[in-house]
């Protein structure tokens, strides 16, 4: 049955639209928001605003069905939220939240035709376009907006969008610089907290909400200072001691498969591999494949250099706790492709080296022939004072030395 509702006063349109929606098949929040906003504009004026809305929303919808609501939540949080409690207020029906008295004082879209028109043509138009740029670039390692959007996306860190939208003003002249800067700092933030043993998902969220407020509409110079201070504060808070640098060897030396998840470890070694490849003029393997493909043939897996066998246990005095702790440190791990990892198995170190030949560059730095005959690698080693070495057996000292080399590389890759 079709029912016609005649409306005399156009100010009633949003209210009637919402009441009907509550009693039928529910629309998504962004669809209700559209009705509430466009319903305030007179019929003879609404067409260009409707066209603007449709243009941007359809493009965002093409990403996924949920993306439009994620965009609006990100926008309102980026531009208006001050605290964690306020951040949570936008988890649900944000299209109702923004009309509550508290929020309407800040956002001011309730029964305000002038502000609605300005919002659609200025704020919505700009930030929807910015959102699309960020998402599109996050799918491409070689985007003109830099690789960090892609790196963060590989790590499933989509809240970089929140911080970039917070940093950018509408029609921001520094937009491109801010996208590159914030995405780079976000990657540094997430990575160093992991490596320093200072990452906690709840505290990381608190930190991002604090950054969201503190970098809002700031210049690039201000953002970099604020963000680096936040990284120091997060590490200091986690360790309960003030640190002056985000690179602390006493924390990094414990970086391990026992502390970091497999996905992050693969990401970390993928960055190491690409850094080496760029500096010695070699092609690097596909980054996404290194970090996310776990297939049996072409996927990469974490390899323990120190296999679980009698010979290796004797190197660690048959101390079970020490053996497990040492063999899982980053300095005792590599990435190997599919069946190479299976073939390596429980082999002794001398046999494992044969598997490492022809594999990733970081792995090959352990192989005598590769290291001795590769001038580009030798120049790379000298340039950054890495002190790469060949080992006859892989004990605690070898692990510590390789961990120190990784520490140096970390400071170069995430300055």
Image (spheres, rainbow, N blue to C red):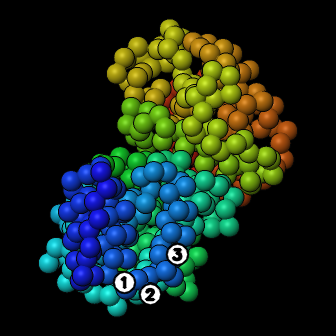
CA gap between label 2 and label 3 equals 11 Å
* Mark 2, residue position: 45
Residue sitting at 62 percent across and 43 percent down?
288
Eye-nearest disc, 2 or 3: 2
Question: Residue 144 in the image: x percent, y percent?
Answer: 68, 67
Could you classify mark 3 by the number of other residues whose Cα lies within 10 Å: few (under 14), some (14-19), or many (20 or more)? few
Depth order, front residue of 79/125: 125
305 left or right of 377?
left
Secondary element at image label 2: helix
Residue under the image location 63 percent in, 21 percent down: 296
Q: Is residue 71 left or right of residue 144?
A: left
> Residue tagged by mark 1?
41
Residue 100 in the image: above or below residue 261: below
Whole-angstrom CA distance, mark 2 to mark 1, is 7 Å
Sequence-first disc among 1 and 3:
1
Q: Is residue 125 visible?
A: no
Q: Is residue 307 above or below residue 164?
A: above
Question: With respect to residue 98, does 410 lie above or below?
Answer: above
Residue 51: image tag = 3
- In the rendering, at what x and y percent does residue 62 appear? 55, 55
């Amino acid at each position: 049955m079709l029912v016609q509702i005649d409306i005399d006063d156009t100010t009633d349109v949003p209210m009637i639209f919402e009441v009907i929606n509550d009693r039928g098949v529910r629309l998504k929040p962004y669809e209700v928001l559209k009705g509430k906003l466009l319903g305030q504009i007179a019929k003879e004026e609404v067409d260009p605003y409707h066209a603007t809305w449709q243009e941007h929303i359809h493009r965002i919808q093409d990403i996924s069905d949920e993306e439009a609501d994620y965009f609006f939540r990100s926008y309102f949080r980026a531009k208006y939220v001050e605290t964690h409690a306020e951040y949570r207020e936008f988890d649900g029906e944000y299209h109702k939240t923004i009309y509550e008295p508290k929020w309407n004082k800040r956002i001011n879209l309730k029964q305000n035709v002038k502000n609605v028109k300005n919002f659609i043509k200025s704020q919505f138009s700009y930030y929807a376009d910015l959102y699309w740029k960020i998402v599109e670039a996050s799918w491409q390692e070689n985007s003109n907006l830099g690789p960090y959007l892609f790196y963060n996306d590989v790590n499933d860190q989509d809240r970089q969008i929140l911080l970039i939208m917070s940093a950018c003003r509408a029609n921001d002249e520094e937009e491109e610089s801010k996208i590159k800067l914030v995405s780079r700092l976000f990657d540094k933030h997430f990575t160093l907290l992991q490596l320093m043993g200072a990452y906690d998902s709840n505290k990381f969220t608190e930190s991002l909400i604090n950054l969201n407020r503190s970098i809002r509409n700031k210049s690039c110079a201000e953002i970099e200072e604020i963000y680096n201070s936040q990284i120091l504060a997060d590490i200091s808070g986690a360790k309960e001691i003030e640190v002056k640098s985000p690179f602390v060897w006493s924390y990094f030396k414990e970086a391990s498969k026992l502390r970091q998840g497999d996905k992050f470890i693969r990401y970390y070694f993928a960055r190491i591999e690409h850094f080496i490849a760029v500096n010695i003029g070699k092609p690097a393997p596909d980054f996404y494949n290194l970090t996310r493909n776990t297939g049996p043939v072409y996927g990469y897996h974490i390899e323990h250099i120190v296999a679980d066998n009698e010979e290796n246990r004797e190197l660690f005095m048959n101390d079970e706790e020490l053996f497990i702790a040492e063999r899982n440190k980053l300095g005792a791990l590599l990435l190997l492709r599919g069946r190479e990892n299976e073939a390596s198995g429980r082999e002794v170190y001398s046999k494992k080296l044969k598997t490492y030949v022809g594999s990733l560059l970081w792995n090959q730095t352990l192989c005598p022939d590769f290291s001795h005959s590769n001038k580009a690698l030798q120049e790379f080693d000298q340039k950054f004072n890495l002190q790469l070495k060949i080992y006859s057996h892989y004990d605690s000292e070898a692990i510590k030395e390789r961990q120190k080399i990784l520490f140096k590389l970390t400071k170069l890759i995430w300055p």
